[in-house]
Amino acid sequence: MQTVKKRKGKIRVWIVILLIVGVIALGMAGAVVLTAPGRNELQNMVIADVDFKQLRDGVYTGAYRGTKDGFRNAAVEVTVASGAVTKIRVTEGALAGDKQTTKIRKGLTINNLFDEVIKSQSLQVDVISGATLTSKAHLKAVENALKQAEIK
């Protein structure tokens, strides 16, 4: 009699564990399905080639707003001095709660990507591996800021 009760108790524990795992799996699958349109939008997005030699000095703001979802929205402030991009600051996006850039992959922050943009004076830089979509969203925000700075 006692062993039957123990067995029933163990079965109940396993049922509860399996139910919890099932609910978590369904939640994760739902998140993947819900964010798919936004991911596809970013994967297919092209970062335009801005002529960094034709920029007016000043501070410009730019943003990327996903049309499918807002999970990777980004905003930046770009400083152009002496015709060159000298500073890029995130104002929305890959930020931690204290408004400091958060590590997004292997200890790298979005500032590492921006350092490459400043160094090469081009938006055609390698994105952070494993954070491609976040990188592209922030590069698009920089592009949108620089469009305001272009001398036409």
Image (cartoon, helix red, strand yellow):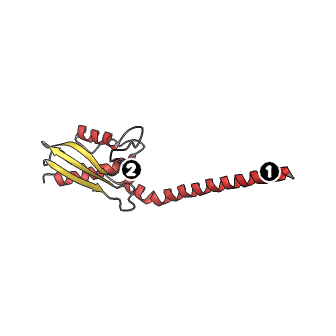
Query: Residue at 36% across / 62% down in the picture?
Result: 67
Which residue is tagged 2?
133
Q: Nearer the viewer, residue 81 or 129?
A: 81
Q: Amino acid at mark 1?
A: Lys
31 is higher (above) or lower (below) than 56: below
Circle 1: element type: helix
Residue 55 image position (x, y, % from top left) = 15, 48
Query: Residue at 45% across / 58% down in the picture?
Result: 35
**Disc 1 residue crowd, few under 14, some 14–19, many 20+, Cα 10 Å:** few
Residue 89 visible in the snapshot: yes
Q: Mark 1 and mark 2: span between their CA atoms?
A: 51 Å
The part of the image, by quadrant, that contains residue 44 is: bottom left
Q: Quadrant of the C terminus?
A: bottom left
The part of the image, by quadrant, that contains residue 124 is: top left
CB under 8 Å between discs 1 and 2: no
Q: Amino acid at mark 2?
A: Leu
Left or right of 100: which side holds 7? Answer: right
Residue 125 visible in the snapshot: no
Left or right of 78: which side holds 95? Answer: right
Circle 2: element type: helix
The part of the image, by quadrant, that contains residue 73 is: bottom left
